[in-house]
């Protein structure tokens, strides 16, 4: 039913929605009880979604929730996160001190760029800083989630968003994030949208929510009986049926037809099924004609005011109506009086402002004006906004609808608007930039204010925006447009454009097309310009490495080395070939992939030195090579080096607009953290990578990030969650034959092992490793698989099967006595038959792992050493090794392994995991909260975000928890909590 304070014929009852209203009340009650609830109200325009949202507000208020409302609008979907700003900004302003106290500094900084109420907290931007166009907007989404949690305290919050089918891209991405990462606490998020106008991104975003958190309500048409109740007793049965058949039971259509149709005749046109649609395919012909007739019946000056108001926005002020019309403000006010009397417009919540009674009425008012008149009206509004020094994006909205071709001042405003919105919504920024390019002549002459923008530079910027905005196909097409516009002999520029295009083709899972483009461009380059084609060679080598085609990569490396050895080649690289970082890194990848580990270690050391000596500006053009180095260092066990390179790579990616590489780099960081035993941080970084990859729209990046997250979650002890993540990774990999696609299958196999389905898990692991016949997986993953499976087989008393996996580990290049995983796999196999040898092997494996900083693997070796010593009757040594393992498992958050170790300790008579008698310290309420999150494996940073504290405050609370519980590690907190008295009252 329309959101109308005065329904037709005075019938104020909400008709036909009793069950829906009851359900909405239940959802509000569940939210007030502490749950996050997502409610969708969907249907045709005029079905009554807005009115039902009002009923939701009433139910929420009765439950004591604070109600905040926002609304999407048809012609103003170009402001990033506009739904969140519309709904939350006033509340943020009224509770600014509380909000600032609840947010960590980074979240506060990010939100200051979104919410005007917090803009005073925004640091002065550096004019020299490069425009930020990246995938880091997922951090903004997390900051908004924290903001919602803060606003929901203490009494609960209901955020009601109307017409989200018109939401901007940033708002849709935010909804997707909230659906996948629901805020904690009493919070109801209700949205309305038109079923047929909801784009695939919006429907996918809402579908991401867990089924138990989401309620979808289809707002159905009224029945004939309900339509009669809606129309009232003054409408006779014959006319009532005619109106009902023409409207299809839609309340808005019923109202429009009843307003216009004479009482003695049926409405014009047939029923809904046979009606001719309007331009949007939404309104039946008869309804459109009825609403158009309502507008046509207005006096000329009043209709002109309605058309002028429709150009302005969802809400408008009389002064700007006068500008758009154009007329005097007094005449505009008089026209608005009549429009309000006829219920075309209504007073908006903000004083002195108005809005149309329904978005459909605004749409028809806008469409009823002449196209030329609209251009002039938008131009008048843009000029007035310029005089008022309005925000660039507000001006750009009208400039985009009125600027003339060749107007370089308008082009400048649109480019500025694009750069202002690039961080929060690169897809929106890309629309501004595309419009600017459409207005830019091929050969602009510039203005007195300065030279005209360079078309090619703007196209390159547009391609990057489209890429990081998740519009990979559009970005690829724009990069191809750059190639078409470049002169045939612009070899260096063409190589750079082709390389970027190939990167986007890879992200689109179109690797073959990317290779074909690179080879085509390479074939066009004459010998005397071969050095200009170096980026093409580098991309082809990287592509071969990702596909585990080490022979092809080596051959391409030889060709590149020959090019760089020619006169002028070293100058192009900036270094002799043997000391040029990208070339050294790719040689390292070839050596490692081919199993030449001695050469790989020498090259890794050289790459480390060259990277340390280079500036960020020197590394920026070759960031993809640096991302390779992150991964190879981590795989080789060079974990400190990998951690440093990852941090630097991410900083360069963000500073230079190359954040389309961020998912790869973030996943490498998660992989590195996992190998060092920082499991909570590893899971966090993997989740960062998943979020960034989803925003990018790359199945390859999503699959890789999910696979690594699955492996990290498995170590925390949640094998069921690890299995679900691995299955999702496999779906995104979609059968690709590349190493990253195999990693999801590894995750699935090891998760099945964790669920005690060892045979099924073994089959999956063997498949992931290609039965160890020319496997695509790199050697460290192969060794991890072998060792994990040897452990699983040993634990279920199958030493022969364990020995088989140990043999496979020994056959992997580098899988000899210098490999911790190979040595530990053999120790697992020897556990039953020769426990003394198993103990020696496990101790040796622990030493190897400790040397590379792999704490978690070292602890697993100590666990095996402990059980082996126990098998030899060496109980003292067993207790020592098991105690070391338990300490590390607890500190790392490896709860499953910790529990397994505790069971082994108890077999030896150790009272492990029990509260000591001396732990009589009383935890404060806040300390109890912190302790519980420590028990769950959260890092201090994540605890700070959850509890709205600074990290330093959390460190203090953790120290107090340790002191009061009489423990010295995070691991021991879990075992002590059961014996601690409740918090202070």
Image (cartoon, rainbow, N blue to C red):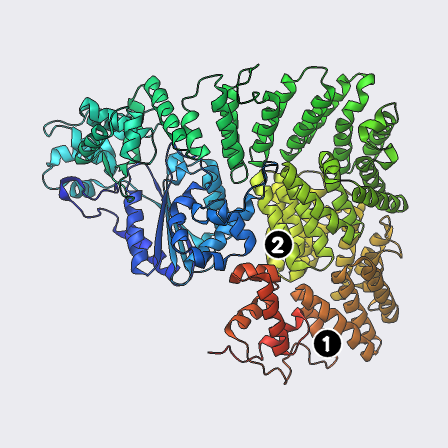
Name the residue that disc number 2 marks. 684
Tag in front: 1 or 2: 2
Q: As displayed, is residue 254 above or below residue 956?
A: above
Q: Nearer the viewer, residue 331 or 264?
A: 331
| Relative side of 114 to 788, left or right | left
Tell which circle, 1 or 2, labels the residue nearer the N-terminal end. 2
| Relative side of 323 to 521, left or right | left
Percent x, y for residue 677?
A: 71, 60
Q: As displayed, is residue 664 above or below residue 639?
A: above
Residue at position x 48%, y 40% from top?
170
Residue density around tag 1, few if under 14, some if 14–19, many if 20 or more, within 10 Å: many
SS for callout 2: helix
User: Which residue, as the protein is rendered here, is positioned at the far bottom?
Assistant: 917
SS for callout 1: helix
Percent x, y for residue 939?
A: 62, 61
| Relative side of 707 to 471, left or right | right
Residue at position x 54%, y 46% from top?
123
> Which quadrant: the N terminus?
top left
Residue density around tag 2, few if under 14, some if 14–19, many if 20 or more, within 10 Å: some
Q: As displayed, is residue 813 above or below residue 152?
A: above
Q: Quadrant of residue 733?
A: top right
Name the residue that disc number 1 marks. 905
Residue at position x 78%, y 38% from top?
548
């Amino acid at each position: 039913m329309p959101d109308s304070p005065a329904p037709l014929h005075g019938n104020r009852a909400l008709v036909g929605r009793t069950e829906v209203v009851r359900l909405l009340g239940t959802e509000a009650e569940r939210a007030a009880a502490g749950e996050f609830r997502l409610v969708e109200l969907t249907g045709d325009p005029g079905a009554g979604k807005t009115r039902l949202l009002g009923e939701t507000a009433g139910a929420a208020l009765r439950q004591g929730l604070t109600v905040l409302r926002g609304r999407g609008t048809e012609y103003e979907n170009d402001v990033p996160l506009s739904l969140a700003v519309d709904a939350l900004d006033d509340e943020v302003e009224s509770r600014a001190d509380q909000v600032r106290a609840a947010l960590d500094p980074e979240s506060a900084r990010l939100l200051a760029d979104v919410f005007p109420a917090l803009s005073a907290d925004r640091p002065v931007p550096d004019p020299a800083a490069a425009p930020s166009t990246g995938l880091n907007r997922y951090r903004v989404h997390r900051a908004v989630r924290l903001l919602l949690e803060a606003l929901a305290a203490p009494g609960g919050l209901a955020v009601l968003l109307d017409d989200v089918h018109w939401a901007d891209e940033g708002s849709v991405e935010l909804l997707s994030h909230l659906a996948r990462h629901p805020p904690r606490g009493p919070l109801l998020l209700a949205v309305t949208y038109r079923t047929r106008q909801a784009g695939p991104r919006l429907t996918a975003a809402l579908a991401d929510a867990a089924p138990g958190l989401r309620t979808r309500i289809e707002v159905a048409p009224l029945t004939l009986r309900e339509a009669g109740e809606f129309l009232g007793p003054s409408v006779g049965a014959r006319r009532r049926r005619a109106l009902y058949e023409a409207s299809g039971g839609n309340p808005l259509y019923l109202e429009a037809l009843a307003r216009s149709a004479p009482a003695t005749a049926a409405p014009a046109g047939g029923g809904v099924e046979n009606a001719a649609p309007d331009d949007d395919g939404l309104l039946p012909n008869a309804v459109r004609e009825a609403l158009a007739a309502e507008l046509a019946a207005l006096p000329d000056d009043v209709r002109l005011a309605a058309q002028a108001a429709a150009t302005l926005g969802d809400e408008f002020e009389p002064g700007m109506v006068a500008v758009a019309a154009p007329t005097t403000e007094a005449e505009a006010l008089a026209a608005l009086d009549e429009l309000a009397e006829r219920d075309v417009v209504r007073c908006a919540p903000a004083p002195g402002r108005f809005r149309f009674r329904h978005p459909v009425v605004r749409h028809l008012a806008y469409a009823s004006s002449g196209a030329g008149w609209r251009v002039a009206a938008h131009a008048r509004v843009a000029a007035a906004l310029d005089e008022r020094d309005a925000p660039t994006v507000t001006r750009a909205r009208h400039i985009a609808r009125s600027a003339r071709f060749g107007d370089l001042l308008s082009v400048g405003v649109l480019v500025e608007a694009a750069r202002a919105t690039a961080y929060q919504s690169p897809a929106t920024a890309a629309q501004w930039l595309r419009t600017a390019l459409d207005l830019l002549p091929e050969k602009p002459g510039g203005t007195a204010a300065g030279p005209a923008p360079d078309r090619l530079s703007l196209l390159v910027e547009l391609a990057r925006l489209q890429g990081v905005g998740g519009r990979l196909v559009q970005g690829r097409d724009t990069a191809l447009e750059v190639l078409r516009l470049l002169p045939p002999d612009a070899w260096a520029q063409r190589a750079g454009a082709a390389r970027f295009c190939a990167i986007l083709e890879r992200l689109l899972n179109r690797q073959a097309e990317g290779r074909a483009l690179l080879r085509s461009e390479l074939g066009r380059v004459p010998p005397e310009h071969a050095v200009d084609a170096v980026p093409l060679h580098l991309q082809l080598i990287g592509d071969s490495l990702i596909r585990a085609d080490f022979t092809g990569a080596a051959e391409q490396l030889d060709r590149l080395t020959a090019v760089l050895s020619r006169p002028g080649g070293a100058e192009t690289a900036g270094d002799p070939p043997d000391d040029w970082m990208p070339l050294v890194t790719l040689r390292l990848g070839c050596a490692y992939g081919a199993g030449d580990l001695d050469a790989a270690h020498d090259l890794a050391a050289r790459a480390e030195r060259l990277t340390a000596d280079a500036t960020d500006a020197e590394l920026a053009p070759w960031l993809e090579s640096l991302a390779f180095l992150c991964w190879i260092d981590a795989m080789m066990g060079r974990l400190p080096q990998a951690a440093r390179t990852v941090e630097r790579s991410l900083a360069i990616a963000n500073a230079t607009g190359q954040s389309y590489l961020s998912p790869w780099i973030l996943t490498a960081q998660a992989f590195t953290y996992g190998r060092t035993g920082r499991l909570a941080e590893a899971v966090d970084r993997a989740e960062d990578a998943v979020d960034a990859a989803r925003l990018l729209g790359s199945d390859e990046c999503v699959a890789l990030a999910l696979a690594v997250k699955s492996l990290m979650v498995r170590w925390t002890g949640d094998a069921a969650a690890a299995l679900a993540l691995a299955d999702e990774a496999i779906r995104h990999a979609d059968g690709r034959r590349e190493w990253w696609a195999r990693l999801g299958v590894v995750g699935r196999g090891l998760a099945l092992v964790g669920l005690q389905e060892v045979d099924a898990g073994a089959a999956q692991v063997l498949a992931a490793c290609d039965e160890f016949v020319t496997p695509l997986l790199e050697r460290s993953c192969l060794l991890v698989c072998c060792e994990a499976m040897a452990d699983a087989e040993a634990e279920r008393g199958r030493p022969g099967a364990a020995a088989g996996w140990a043999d496979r580990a020994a056959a992997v290049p580098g899988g000899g006595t210098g490999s911790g995983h190979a040595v530990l796999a053999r120790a697992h196999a020897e556990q039953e038959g020769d426990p003394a040898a198993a103990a020696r092997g496990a101790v040796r494996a622990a030493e190897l792992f400790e040397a590379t900083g792999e704490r978690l693997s070292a602890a697993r070796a100590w666990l095996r050493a402990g059980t082996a010593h126990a098998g030899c009757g060496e109980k003292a040594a067993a207790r020592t090794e098991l105690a070391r393992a338990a300490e590390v498992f607890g500190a790392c958050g490896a709860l499953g392994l910790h529990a397994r170790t505790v069971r082994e300790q108890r077999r030896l008579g150790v009272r492990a995991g029990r509260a000591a008698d001396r732990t009589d310290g009383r935890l404060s309420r806040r300390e109890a909260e912190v302790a519980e999150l420590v028990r769950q494996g959260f890092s201090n940073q994540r605890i700070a975000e959850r509890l709205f504290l600074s990290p330093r405050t959390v460190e203090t609370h953790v120290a107090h928890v340790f002191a009061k519980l009489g423990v010295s590690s995070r691991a021991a907190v879990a075992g002590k909590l059961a014996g601690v008295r409740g918090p202070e009252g």
